[in-house]
Amino acid sequence: MCESWIKLKQRLFNKNFVSLNFNFKKMKVLLDINDSRSKFFMEMVKSLNYVTVLEEIKEKKKSELVGDLVEAFQNVTAFEKGEKKLKKAKDLLNEL
């Protein structure tokens, strides 16, 4: 994987909803939470002394953008593992 791609992934995923600390290691978690339960969930998460909420994304457009980025990273990861073939740029242009 090229170095710039790794840096881009790190920059984007340092701004997820919840950061969990276990044994001095950090895990990032991106969650979709039903609006009717989100207030309760966030209160519960914030009450945990080992969890730091970095950012809450409540705007629909930003939420969709984050979802699209996650999907793009999943596609790239699947391509790198040989599980998915990508379209050629020429084919993408022809679709437009």
Image (cartoon, rainbow, N blue to C red):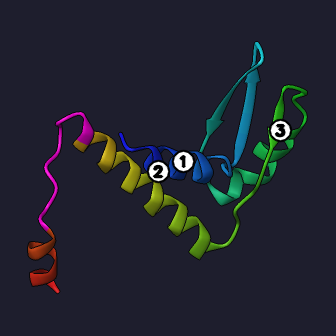
**Residue position marked by numbered label 2 in the rendering:** 4
Task: State the mark number for residue 67.
Answer: none
Q: Residue 22 vs residue 12: left or right? A: right
- Residue at the image point whose x is 83% and y is 38% from the top: 52
Residue 94 visible to an observer of this rendering:
yes
The residue type indicated by label 3 comes to Thr
- Residue at the image point whose x is 62% and y is 54% from the top: 34
Q: Earlier in the sequence, mark 3 or mark 2?
A: 2
State the extent of the magenta-drawn residues as a range: 80-88
Q: Quadrant of the N terminus?
A: top left
Q: Could you say where residue 29 lies in the image, as x and y percent from the top left?
A: 62, 38
Contact (CB < 8 A) between labels 1 and 3? Answer: no
Q: Earlier in the sequence, mark 1 or mark 3?
A: 1
The residue type indicated by label 1 comes to Lys
**Residue position marked by numbered label 3 in the rendering:** 52
For this orientation, the residue located farthest to the front is 3
Q: Quadrant of the C terminus?
A: bottom left
Q: Quadrant of residue 22?
A: top right
Please say whether residue 57 is one of the residues in the magenta stretch. Answer: no
- What whole-number distance in Å separates the C-alpha atoms at marks 1 and 2? 5 Å
Contact (CB < 8 A) between labels 1 and 2? Answer: yes
Kindly state the secondary structure of the residue where label 2 is placed.
helix
- Residue at the image point whose x is 58% and y is 65% from the top: 63
Q: Residue 64 vs residue 20: left or right? A: left
Kindly state the secondary structure of the residue where label 3 is placed.
strand
**Residue position marked by numbered label 1 in the rendering:** 7
Q: Residue 42 vs residue 17: left or right? A: right
- What whole-number distance in Å separates the C-alpha atoms at marks 3 and 2? 27 Å
Q: Could you say where residue 55 lies in the image, as x and y percent from the top left?
A: 76, 54
The residue type indicated by label 2 comes to Ser
Asked if 45 appears above or below 92 in the picture, the reply is: above
